[in-house]
């Protein structure tokens, strides 16, 4: 009985699907390396990596609570713990709150600016799951939520947030629009039937173009940040690899097939990793 409950809680916080944690982690690592001008201190790295995991897990629990009345009608999500009745809505909220408290305790050694930003990050994480009811492009809110590690990392290292951090932040919002539109294309028919809002529905037949433009903004923002941070030419190795990934994703989503769109979404882990590699190389040989 206890073992099964633990398994259900594991599914609630998506231990079986680390892709979300990775998509949240990469932008945070970009910012940590750039703000630190190289490898950050171990304490900061550990705090932000653990914090990323905790906040993504809390977000998943909150998302399942918010979508409990919709998930049961979607093939991909009907077996999630809350909508299937394995975990109650109150339990899911309790798990989300507990994880958020642990994450906040984790950043207590950091400065006041970082703590203040963490409160804003929590508010966005709570609001995001409900935006699918009324916002045309809720993926933009997801991008804000998934990008809050950027200003927090700069604040923790520099106690200020420079222009390059905000450029990185905006680029990440467009990255989230790109990969989560691909994700939304998987569930588009179900979402239309349920009356939900997603970028895949809003963009309609122009969704592939919208994804391409979003990738373009991300990649251009990375070039701008590289110039501001004075990264060397090795940065381009990671950037070009990321460009190849983006082109591969566009080829997949242009089929508009569920499996191909989901594959494009999951493969964004590599794109984020290649951009991180470019930043690391661009700083390592400066």
Image (cartoon, rainbow, N blue to C red):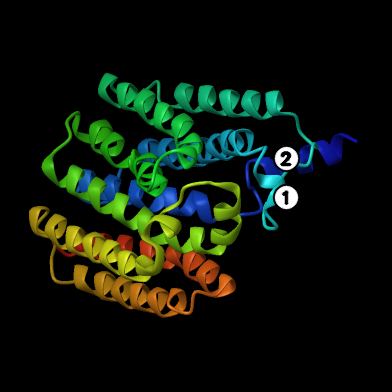
Find disc 1 in the rendering and name its residue: 78
Q: Secondary structure at mark 2?
A: loop
Q: Is residue 100 left or right of residue 276?
A: right
Front residue of this view, candidates 88 and 152: 88
Q: CA distance from mark 1 to mark 2?
A: 7 Å
Dot 1 or dot 2: first in sequence order is 1
The part of the image, by quadrant, that contains residue 202 is bottom left
Residue drawn at (69%, 23%) of the image: 90
Position of residue 37 relative to residue 235, above or below, is: above
- Which residue is pictured at 25% across the width and 70% down the height? 239
Of residue 57 and residue 84, the one placed in the foreground of this image is 84
For this view, does 248 lie left or right of residue 234? right
Quadrant of residue 122 within the rendered picture = top left
The percent position of residue 187, horizontal first and vertical second, equals: 57, 59
Residue drawn at point x = 31 percent, y = 27 percent:
117
Of all residues shown, which one is farthest toward the right?
1
Query: Is 191 drawn above or below residue 59 in the view shown?
Result: below
Instruction: Determine whether the residue tagged by mark 1 lies in a helix, strand or loop.
Output: loop
Is residue 69 positioned above or below 180 on the image? Answer: above
Q: Is residue 47 above or below residue 261?
A: above
**Residue at the spot of label 2:** 83
Q: Quadrant of the N terminus?
A: top right
Q: Which mark identifies residue 8?
A: none
Whole-percent x and y of residue 101?
A: 52, 22
- Nearest the camera: 129 or 26? 129
Check contact, mark 1 vs mark 2: CB within 8 A: yes
Residue 276: % across, % down: 32, 60
- Label 2: how many Cα within 10 Å (few below 14, some 14–19, many 20+): many
| Residue 11 visible in this rendered orientation of the protein | yes
């Amino acid at each position: 009985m206890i073992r099964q409950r633990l398994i259900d809680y594991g599914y609630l916080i998506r231990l079986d699907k680390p892709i979300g944690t990775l998509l949240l982690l990469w932008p945070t690592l970009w910012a940590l390396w750039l703000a630190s001008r190289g490898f950050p201190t171990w304490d900061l790295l550990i705090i932000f990596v653990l914090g990323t995991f905790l906040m993504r897990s809390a977000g998943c629990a909150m998302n399942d609570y918010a979508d409990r009345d919709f998930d049961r009608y979607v093939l991909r999500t009907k077996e999630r713990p809350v909508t299937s009745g394995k975990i109650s809505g109150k339990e899911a909220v309790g798990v989300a709150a507990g994880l958020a408290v642990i994450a906040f305790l984790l950043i207590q050694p950091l400065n006041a600016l970082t703590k203040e930003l963490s409160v804003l990050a929590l508010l966005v994480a709570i609001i995001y799951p409900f935006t699918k009811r009324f916002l045309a492009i809720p993926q933009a809110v997801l991008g804000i939520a998934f990008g809050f590690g950027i200003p927090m990392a700069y604040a923790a290292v520099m106690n200020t947030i420079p222009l390059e951090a905000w450029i990185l932040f905006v680029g990440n919002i467009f990255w989230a629009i790109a990969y989560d539109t691909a994700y939304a294309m998987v569930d588009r028919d179900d979402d239309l039937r349920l009356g939900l809002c997603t970028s895949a529905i809003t963009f309609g037949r122009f969704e592939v173009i919208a994804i391409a433009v979003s990738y373009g903004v991300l990649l251009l923002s990375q070039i701008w940040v590289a110039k501001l941070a004075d990264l060397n030419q090795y940065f381009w190795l990671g950037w070009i690899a990321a460009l190849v990934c983006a082109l591969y994703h566009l080829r997949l989503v242009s089929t508009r097939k569920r499996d191909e769109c989901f594959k494009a979404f999951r493969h964004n882990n590599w794109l984020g990793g290649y951009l991180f590699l470019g930043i690391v190389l661009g700083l390592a040989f400066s």
